[in-house]
Image: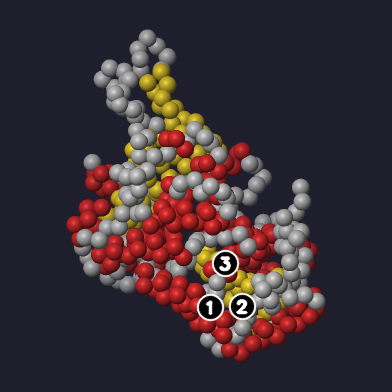
């Protein structure tokens, strides 16, 4: 099989914020894995951009330490070979001089390669720097291609994209003035996970699912994003955001879109992103106080207000549960439950689809309607479970629930299922936007989330306190459902 990277053109990869946590935990290790697997262009260079005073040698040593800390059993020689492709440019995000020095580096590198290279700009920085960097990149001319046919430029932006609908729209308008949509790659790293990418294959490659993937056969859908830990060192960001903004507006809604989207017709990025956006635009938006009180729930784990950088009287939610619907003929009336929380009994991301039992029910006398359940586990223990009913041995017609199960890791032993960033980076280099969020998706997500967050901030619903690692919130929501 031919290597998909063999035809990739010379590329310069600029990482703004190259000495931060994202570089250390994700970008440097993922780029190294791409290098190990020969999935980077034959000619490439990584330029780190940050305010820290470093020279090329010290930056390479720093990157080497990052890789060895995260990539188990990596070859020292291989790491040294890889870091030779790294250089460093000191600069302040708000000052033009650093960007002008970057332009000089580009000119020197292109002269050495004797070609106009592609340019990638990765904003590995807090969101408050986005606007400044966007302007500086555009005003300095760094994002202009050499010609319509040579030397593309792309900008990679991390979540969160805005803090609410208004800030997201402002950022989008700014980006739209400075860059074309095909240049912009908005990262929701969950879309890079192998099990998330598999949803499309699972949905549309198996013919027996599509005929029953509708309101006639499905009784309810639930998406859980549980974490069994707290906020760690993210107090400043988290206390100003909360659980719904942190994982609901992005990860959970993207899972929802993938599970409920209609057949896109083909696997092109344009078709897939269009169908994902169509789902999110069809979400029932809760605006009235009564609806938000009845259809949403929020909580905060005990001890949250004692966490580092958290306000002592904080009303920020660390748990939420929302019931909603899709306003489409296919899914009209099917309740959808979105749930996320920290300090939960376990960590898991799972989509559960409960199927209706046909009526009238051919059931044992006095028996209930037996329902089949599909559980799609994204992480951990990546797997797909489908329940079914069988007759227990004996003279009586007595049924028992059993399970069809597919274990992703066991089936593909030796394959790396965890490195979402490696897949995302490779997709950016190839110019494939399938795994990246479109403007339509971003804005539709905020239109759904905004009214709920504003109502919570105004105190229209009670902020329940729950014990860490307990299922108190789970029991409360079950009582509410009844």
CA distance separating discs 3 and 2: 13 Å
Residue 202 horizontal side relative to residue 245, left or right: right
Q: Tag 3: Cα neighbours inside 10 Å, few (<14), some, or many (≥20)?
A: few
Residue with the mark numbered 3: 182
The percent position of residue 368, horizontal first and vertical second, equals 29, 26
Disc 1 secondary structure class: helix
Q: Residue at x 26, y 20 (%)?
A: 366
Q: Please state the horizontal and vertical placement of residue 180, each as a whole percent of the image.
A: 55, 72
Tell me how far mark 3 sits from mark 1, CA to CA: 12 Å
Name the mark nearer the viewer: 3 or 2. 3
Tell which residue pokes out farthest to the top in this image.
Answer: 395
SS of the residue under disc 2: loop
Give the side of residue 280 with respect to residue 202, left or right.
left
Q: Which residue is mark 2?
A: 143
At a point 52% along the width and 74% down the height, the residue shown is: 125
Q: Which mark is residue 178?
A: 1
Q: Is residue 310 visible?
A: yes
């Amino acid at each position: 099989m031919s290597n998909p990277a063999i035809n990739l053109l010379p590329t310069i990869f600029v990482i703004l914020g190259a000495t931060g946590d994202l570089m250390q935990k994700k970008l440097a290790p993922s780029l190294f894995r791409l290098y190990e697997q020969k999935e980077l262009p034959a000619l490439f260079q990584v330029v780190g951009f940050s305010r820290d005073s470093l020279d090329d040698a010290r930056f390479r040593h720093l990157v080497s330490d990052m890789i060895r800390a995260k990539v188990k059993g990596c070859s020292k020689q291989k790491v040294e070979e890889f870091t030779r492709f790294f250089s460093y440019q000191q600069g302040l995000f708000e000052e033009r001089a650093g960007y002008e020095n970057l332009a000089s580096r580009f000119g020197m590198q292109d002269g050495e390669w004797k070609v106009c290279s592609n340019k990638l700009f990765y904003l590995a920085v807090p969101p408050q720097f986005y606007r400044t960097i966007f302007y500086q990149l555009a005003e300095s001319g760094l994002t202009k291609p050499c010609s319509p046919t040579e030397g593309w430029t792309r900008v990679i932006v991390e979540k969160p994209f805005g803090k609410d609908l208004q800030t997201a729209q402002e950022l989008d308008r700014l980006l739209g003035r400075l860059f074309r949509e095909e240049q912009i790659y908005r990262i929701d790293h969950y879309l890079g996970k192998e099990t998330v990418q598999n949803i499309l294959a699972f949905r549309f490659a198996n013919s027996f699912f599509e005929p029953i993937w509708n309101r006639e056969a499905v009784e309810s859908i639930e998406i859980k994003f549980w974490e069994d830990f707290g906020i760690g060192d993210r107090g400043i960001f988290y206390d100003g955001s909360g659980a719904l903004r942190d994982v609901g507006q992005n990860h959970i809604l993207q899972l929802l879109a993938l599970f409920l989207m209609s057949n896109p017709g083909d696997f092109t990025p344009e078709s897939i992103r269009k169908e994902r956006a169509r789902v999110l635009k069809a979400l029932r938006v809760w605006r009235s106080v009564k609806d938000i009180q009845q259809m949403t729930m929020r909580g905060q784990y005990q001890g949250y207000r004692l966490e580092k950088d958290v306000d002592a009287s904080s009303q920020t939610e660390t748990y939420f549960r929302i019931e909603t619907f899709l306003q489409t003929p296919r899914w009209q009336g099917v309740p959808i439950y979105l749930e996320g929380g920290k300090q939960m009994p376990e960590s898991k991301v799972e989509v559960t689809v409960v199927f209706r039992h046909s009526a009238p029910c051919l059931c044992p006398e006095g028996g209930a309607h037996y329902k089949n359940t599909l559980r799609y586990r994204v992480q951990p223990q990546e797997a797909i479970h489908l329940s079914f009913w069988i007759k227990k041995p004996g003279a009586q017609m007595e049924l028992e629930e059993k399970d069809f199960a597919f274990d992703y890791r066991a089936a593909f032993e030796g394959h790396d299922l965890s490195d979402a960033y490696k897949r995302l980076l490779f997709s950016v280099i190839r110019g494939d936007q399938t795994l990246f969020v479109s403007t339509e998706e971003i804005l539709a997500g905020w239109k759904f989330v905004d009214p709920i967050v504003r109502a919570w901030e105004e105190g229209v619903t009670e902020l329940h306190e729950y014990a860490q690692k307990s299922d108190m919130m789970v029991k409360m929501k079950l009582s509410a459902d009844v």
